[in-house]
Image (tube, rainbow, N blue to C red):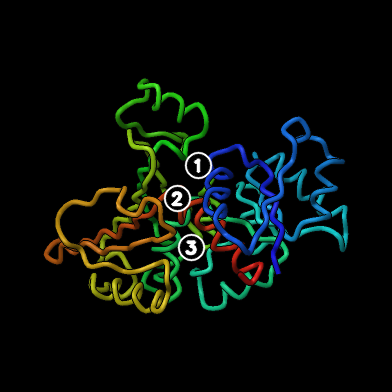
Amino acid sequence: MIKKIFIDGEAGTTGLQIREILGGRDDVTLVAIAPEKRKDAEAKAEIYADVDLVILCLPDAAAKESVALADSLGGKGPRVLDASTAHRVAPGWTYGFPELAAGQGEAVAAARRVANPGCYATGAIAMLRPLTDVGLIAPDQLLAINAVSGYSGGGKQMIEAYESGTGAPFELYALDLEHKHIPEIMAYGRLRNRPLFVPSVGNFRQGMLVSLPLALDDLPGKPEAGDLEAALAAHYAGQKHVRIVAPDGGKLEPQALNGTNDLEIRVFANQARRQALIVARLDNLGKGASGAAVQNLQLMLGL
């Protein structure tokens, strides 16, 4: 049976990418709304009542309004996949990272409300959760997380600046240390202490590296780097989109997974110094946004 999908906010970067990925499929139909009616609640309600799934690619406030609209339809309301930040740690919502833990994919498949993860959070949680689950990182560990993303994740103004040639070659941002992905990193990475998260943007369109530096002697049990890699490998054994890769040199660039829904994790180590660096590489528009959304909708709709 062909499933009906409405992308609410399809004109944005994530919405356009989702539409492009789904465009060649014959098991879904993409329902559209006239541009002049995008903010018309009555017109949206009519579409919501007629589709199987609504994907929200909206600012947080608009996403909350759209969820209220879906809820107002009762049994006629659609299932909702929200790509905004609004519901990622909200009660009653399932976190849309199927590889998070055993049974998470099944939870996404059964859920009425799924929150698509943030791009940085996907990389950070992918490294953290397997290690906190087995006690190699303590929940109250003091951690720093660094990341660099392509400019496509920065919104309309940033994209225009870089594509017009006025963007900086590289810049740190969110230097108030209040980045919006921190709550979900803590919640699903199972951290009690707030990590020091420092994001940055480079002069390339898409791609991402998220890195987690660790002093091995500060971790519970003072593990070897190989213990970290083994725990990560065990956690993701059999997963299609997340894999552990052996380091193959002293450099790592961020764009190799562009256009995919894949995520790679590498563990770099200096045994003599008892230091390790775990790095997640992904496409900020793939596994970090639209690719993850398509993976989740496939689970939700049984495709």
Residue pictured at 15% horizontal, 66% vertical = 271
Q: Quadrant of the C terminus?
A: bottom right
Alpha carbons under labels 1 and 3: distance apart: 16 Å
263 or 23: which is nearer to us? 23
Q: Residues within 10 Å of mark 2 (few under 14, many from 20)?
A: many
- Look at mark 1 in the image and give the residue it sits on: 179
Q: Quadrant of the N terminus?
A: bottom right
Q: Earlier in the sequence, mark 3 or mark 2?
A: 2
Residue pictured at 51% horizontal, 34% vertical = 155
Q: Earlier in the sequence, mark 1 or mark 2?
A: 2
On the picture, is 39 further left or further right than 264? right
On the picture, is 5 further left or further right than 167? right
Q: Circles 1 and 2: CB distance less than 8 Å?
A: yes
Q: Residues within 10 Å of mark 1 (few under 14, many from 20)?
A: some
Q: Amino acid at mark 3?
A: Gly
Q: Amino acid at mark 2?
A: Tyr
Q: Tell me which corner region of the image, top left, top right, bottom left or bottom right, holds residue 16.
A: top right
- Look at mark 3 in the image and give the residue it sits on: 189
236 or 276: which is nearer to us? 236
Alpha carbons under labels 1 and 2: distance apart: 10 Å
